[in-house]
Amino acid sequence: MDDTDRQLLGLLRHNARTSIASLAKALKVSRGTVQNRLRRLESEGTITGLHQETAAAGRGAPHSCVDDHCRRGQSNRGGSQGTAR
């Protein structure tokens, strides 16, 4: 895992529904590079799923979760498999 992979995971933690094009722009790489990295991270088991969570009323802002790299203590919650689009 290199710095670009770590940045990619950070962006997905912030918003798991970020488009491939937006991820590519933020990382200053091609869309194909982002897609290839996501596939590799998924096949290696680094990413096991992506999902967006909505905050309960009065409990703060919505947050994202990249399974196995989750915030607020959630992990491996049956989110949709595949890339964020």
Image: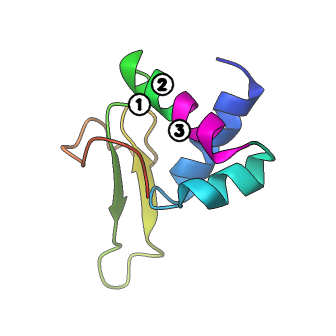
Give the image location of residue 55, x and y in percent.
35, 73
Find residue 70 and name its label.
Answer: none
Density class for disc 3 (Cα within 10 Å; few <14, some 14-19, many ≥20) is some
Identify which amino acid the numbered label 2 is placed on. Leu
As for residue 36 lying within the magenta part, the answer is yes
Q: CA distance from mark 3 to mark 1?
A: 13 Å
Find residue 47 and name its label.
Answer: 1
Q: Residue at x 33, y 42 (%)?
A: 82
Q: Dots 1 and 2: beta carbons under 8 Å?
A: yes
Give the image location of residue 65, x and y in percent.
41, 49
The image shows a total of numbered marks equal to 3
Q: CA distance from mark 2 to mark 3?
A: 10 Å
Mark 2 or 3: the one toward you: 3
| Image: magenta residue range | 30-37
Please determine whether, in this image, residue 52 is positioned above or below residue 56.
above
Residue 32 versus residue 84: which sits nearer the camera? 32
Give the image location of residue 60, x and y in percent.
46, 76
Secondary structure type for disc 1: loop
As for residue 21 lying within the magenta part, the answer is no
Q: Which quadrant of the structure image shows residue 53?
A: bottom left
Q: Main secondary structure of the magenta part?
A: helix
Find residue 41 and name its label.
Answer: 2
Side of 48 relative to 64 (left or right):
left
The residue under label 3 is 35
Side of 75 relative to 66 (left or right):
left
Q: CA distance from mark 1 to mark 2?
A: 6 Å
